[in-house]
Image: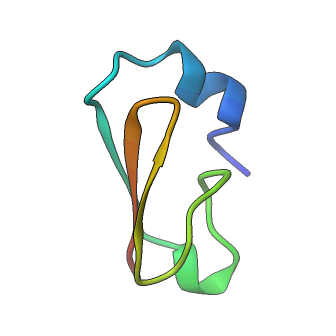
Amino acid sequence: MLISKDTLALMKPGSVVVDMAATSGGNVEGSVAGETVEVNGVKVIGNG
């Protein structure tokens, strides 16, 4: 896990993170493959 929920909480609301490894376990905590979720006001796009 490269980006934890704690790290996401430090980001500004409205920020966007794309997890290019979501289908193989992911690098961003809370990411879901093929979906866009919001964690603490940060959009996490589960791609790849």
* Colour basis: rainbow
Q: Residue 1: where, in percent of width, then height?
A: 74, 51
Residue at the (41%, 31%) spot, across then down: 41
Residue at the (70%, 24%) spot, across then down: 6
Residue at the (67%, 51%) spot, across then down: 29
| Closer to the camera in the image, 41 or 16 | 41
Q: Quadrant of residue 26?
A: bottom right
Is 42 located above or below residue 46 in the figure? above
Is 2 located above or below residue 36 in the figure? above
Q: Residue 19: where, in percent of width, then height?
A: 45, 62
**Residue 35 left/right relative to 22:** left
**Residue 19 left/right relative to 10:** left
**Residue 18 left/right relative to 7:** left
Residue at the (51%, 80%) spot, across then down: 33
Is 30 located above or below residue 20 in the figure? above
Q: How many marks?
A: 0
Q: Residue 16: where, in percent of width, then height?
A: 29, 42
| Closer to the camera in the image, 1 or 11 | 11
Q: Residue 10: where, in percent of width, then height?
A: 53, 14
**Residue 14 left/right relative to 24:** left
Is 37 located above or below residue 23 in the figure? above
From the image, which quarter does the C terminus lie in?
A: bottom left
Q: Quadrant of residue 7?
A: top right
